[in-house]
Amino acid sequence: MDATLKPRTTQEIEDAVKWAAAEEQPLEIMGQGSKRGLGRPVQAAHVLDLSGVAGIESYEPAELVLTVKAGTPISDVEKLVDENAQELSFEPMDYGPLQGLDPGKGTVGGVLAANLSGPRRIKAGAARDHVLGMEAVSGRGEIFNSGGKVVKNVTGYDLPRALCGSFGTLAVASTVTLKVNPKPETSASFVLSGLGDESAVQVLCKAMGSSAEVSGAAHLPAGVGAEKSRTILRLEGFETSVDYRFKGLEQLLRSFGSPERLAEPDSRTLWRTIRDVEPFAGSNAPVWRISVAPTMGPKLVELLRGKLDIQAFYDWSGGLVWVTVLDGLVHETEIRGAVQEIGGGHATLVRAVPSVRSNMDVFQPQPGPLASLSARLKAQFDPSGILNPGRMAAGV
Amino acid sequence: MTAIAMPAPDDAVLARRQDILKALQAIVPGEGVIHEEREMRAYETDALTAYRQLPLIVVLPETVEQVSKVLKYCHDNDVKVVPRGAGTSLSGGALPLADGVLLSMMKFNRVLDIDFDNRAVVVQPGVTNLGITRAVEHEGFYYAPDPSSQIACSIGGNIAENSGGVHCLKYGLTTNNVLGLEMVLINGEVIRLGGKHLDSEGYDLLALMTGSEGLLGVVTEVTVRILQKPETARALLIGFPTSEDGGRCVADIIAAGIIPGGMEMMDKPAIHAAEDFVNAGYPRDVEALLIVELDGPEDEVNFLIGRVEEIAKSNQASHVRISESEEERMTFWAGRKAAFPAVGRISPDYLCMDGTIPRRELPKVLARMRELSEKHGLGVANVFHAGDGNLHPLILYDANKPGELDAAEEFGADILRLCVEVGGVLTGEHGVGIEKRDLMTDMFSDADLKQQQRVKCAFDEKHLLNPGKVFPVLHRCAELGKMHVHKGQLPFPDIPRF
């Protein structure tokens, strides 16, 4: 019996999960299905489709707080806050282009389940940093609330944050409360051309360590989107402040060359390209998302270039490295070995066909005690193992 | 003594005290184990001083291996453990248990690694919050979360409480500034989370640990993000004839797209107490006083000072002063920073509460608080992190007058219930501890609290770490794990199916 269950309310989610728990019927938890290509393929007979649990519950711009149903399209939320001169500061990335799907898809619940953040992550924090409260249904089929609807709260364990990035394996979110922020008046990019990876990341780290309040720090090596390499810093805020800080960066980084200034809307377009990994779109070659200490980014890429035919670029001041392996194989041993060698971090395979993803650790494997703790946590939320089984790791 | 009861000590554990002492002395040699009553007195309370309890034994390990062995011994022998940092908790989070070992982490006091390029600092948990800033300020850096106890409180304690401070609307709480942890579970296992890279792999256990009030694990190493200090900071001191005007001004500042580095409000009793104490130049004829601090690049700050001044004037501000020097800025803050001791001068004792409300409810909450003040026969002064709606009502009482502590606690509980009633929460930054433990059922349902306790079960199935804190009722993990469902007896609803 393969079924798609499409609840319309939290109560109906609860009923569906209760049934699945009692019958031990695994469920694939889905919003619009735009992130099905992330993680390991789920072995489930039924789909729990949450796209019907949608709508804005309350939005109070002056309180910086937004409460929405988890199945609400992320594009609707972005449009609503934009109309009120606000934004989701974590700048959720869109995996659509990279995965060969339509852009602009996905739900709020999906964004949080995958903890999707963009270039502004280094200044404003990740998706999880903007989650204030959550109503969810556990794998036991019980509705629970945690967190609150105010921006400052330490009452009880921080479950709303902890559930971010759990890919629907612990609970099914039904309603979430997010912190929103004022949208910057304007933005501009400071672009240096022709730098090698090592000097480029020095530039990025130097700028991030200054008081220029940089909200994006990326490096596109030669051949990634353009012939010459581009080292890019984003400044956002009130116009007078952006101008002032741009001059400050010119002064600080003058030994690295003189910059080009990219204004709106070109600046915005460039950062969207970086956010959505567009240089690697339009191919089926495997793509890895690797998080390391920023200064270690170039060392990682150098190591990998010595072993594999790759293309790579850097976001997050050098700490987020996007790597595509051009021979079409995933090379997990080489990739994870290199991450280990430069002092650690984590590597996630974010583009590969399902047959490849089901036979490997898509997410960074964890050492024994941590893996056991994660399994115990899973068991406390979902004792029957019915929520997205195997999505993050075999058996979890 | 007071209304909040702790779990009854286990006589069997008390009877084993000598054995436990010997075992701990074998793990932590020399002066690292304290067992004389006279010496243990230093640990009998934290900053919630109305509650005192001598621990069974105090142990001060110096290495991760010792922490691991102590915890494993306690786990294997069913001995409770209360972890402790600097002991500055305002909610009783570090209150000892008569039948529990008090595990002080204050010998873990070294800065291990300063990495300016990666803007990360690795420290041991006993390093003070301000100690981190002190270690990096020669290069212009600082650690952003700044709880008012920052000179004394430890970073390990900040993790446990998810501490905030006056700058957290712009710069975030502890949870937004921590990159990595090493911790020891009650079974002695050592686990590392995160590091100098961003985002944890797998479940976000960093989020769970931060604010877990010592119930999930013992932190032995912390990696935090540091920031370059803002280029400059200036402040405005704004007085309003009513709290409504002040509240509207705050909302208008945020609506204008401005997130100040700090935005603090005080009510009339707090203004007067502070002014009497430090002569900061606060106007006495206002109902609400707002300090707005703007920090960042100089051009931006100067520009925004003008914007905020306009907004203040359009909201009936009766007094507006703008700091023209660093000295003047510090004077504006002097009264606010001295508000607690100032209140301590006008009242023998005070209780500091810590609820958060949606800001729009401020006038209503202040009015209701005045009614409650009359009902309980006790005075109250309010200081308020205005940007994020975090209230700190200070309830004035005299512990030497019979019944006044009880009345103050009841008043405090009424205030926190009021916060929840208007859509807020019990605690914005001080933690639940024992202080708000019995109010958790006012904010959360039974199902909410049970799911939280199941998290505890994944970390500490025997409930040995800091029991009696946070949760009003301790459920056994076996009981929490039961599934109350039966096949065939479920209401299967009318859900669209395809």
Image (cartoon, rainbow, N blue to C red):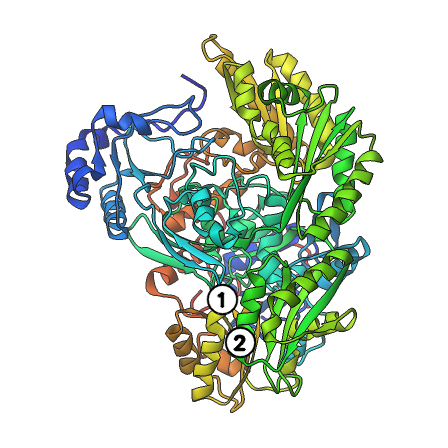
Whether discs 1 and 2 lie on one chain: the answer is: yes
Relative to B66, residue B288 above or below: above
Residue A165: give x, y in percent of width and height.
Answer: 54, 61
Residue lying at 60% horizontally and 56% vertically, measured from the top left: A211
Callout 1: SS: loop
Identify which amino acid the numbered label 1 is placed on: Pro
Closer-to-camera residue (A83/B259)? B259
Residue lying at 27% horizontally and 46% vertically, measured from the top left: B71
Residue A202: give x, y in percent of width and height.
Answer: 53, 71
Q: Is residue A6 visible?
A: no
N-terminal of the pair, mark 1 or mark 2, is 2
Closer-to-camera residue (A110/B115)? B115
Q: Which residue is mark 2?
A: A199
Figure quadrant of residue B316: top right
Closer-to-camera residue (B108/B435)? B108
Name the chain under label 1.
Answer: A
Q: Which residue is mark 1?
A: A389
Identify which amino acid the numbered label 2 is placed on: Ser
In the rendered image, the quadrant that contains the N terminus of chain A is bottom right
Residue lying at 54% horizontally and 55% vertically, measured from the top left: A163
| A368 left or right, relative to A38 | left
Figure quadrant of residue A194: bottom right
In the rendered image, the quadrant that contains the C terminus of chain A is bottom left
Closer-to-camera residue (A288/B340)? B340
Name the chain under label 2.
Answer: A
Relative to A1, residue B488 above or below: above
Q: Is residue A243 visible?
A: yes
